[in-house]
Image (spheres, rainbow, N blue to C red):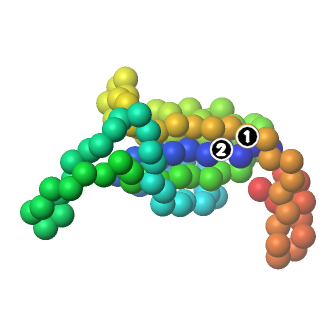
Amino acid sequence: MKLVLAIIQPPKLAAVREALENVEVTRMTVCDAQSFGHRGDRPEFFRGHQYSTTLLRKVVLEIVVNDDFLNRTVETILNTARTGPEGSPGDGKIFVLPADQAIQLDDGARGPGAV
């Protein structure tokens, strides 16, 4: 089992979720996040007033998949979350980490069956 953490642009969330459903990845946790990267200050506008921010809004998808679903999950996110055919800085990142155990709370199922 693997934990896939995908940090993506908020406008891409619906498209990524739909694309993942099409490849039978239907369970995920979605978290709002703020990122701080090497892009520096960015001017924003609120009620007609400009202000500068160093934190950019992102969405983090947390997806635990069995090993046979890993490649299709990563490729789907990679192809759907890009802004354009070659992508651009700030599109996000994907991290793949080992997930040693999964335990389902309602019936106590463990391992790949709990995913």
Residue 107 on image: x %, y %: 87, 74
Give the residue at the far bottom of this rendering: 106
Residues marked 2 and 1 touching at CB (< 8 Å): yes
Residue assigned mark 2: 4
Q: Residue at x 48, y 60 (%)?
A: 32
The residue carrying pointer 1 sits among few (fewer than 14), some (14 to 19) or many (20 or more) residues within 10 Å by Cα, namely: few
Measured as percent of width and height from the top left, residue 54 is found at: 35, 48
Q: Identity of the amino acid at label 2?
A: Val
Residue 50 in percent (x, y) is at: 15, 56
Residue 59 as seen in the image, left or right of residue 11: right
Q: Is residue 108 above or below residue 92?
A: below
The residue to which callout 1 is attached is 97
Name the residue: 35% across, 29% down.
88
Type of residue at label 1? Leu
Q: Residue furthest top?
A: 86
Q: Examine the image and state in which quarter residue 73 appears.
A: top right
Q: Is residue 11 left or right of residue 64?
A: left
Residue neighbourhood size for the residue with mark 2, other residues' Cα within 10 Å, grouped as few (<14), some (14–19), many (≥20): many
What label sits on residue 44 in the rendered view? Answer: none
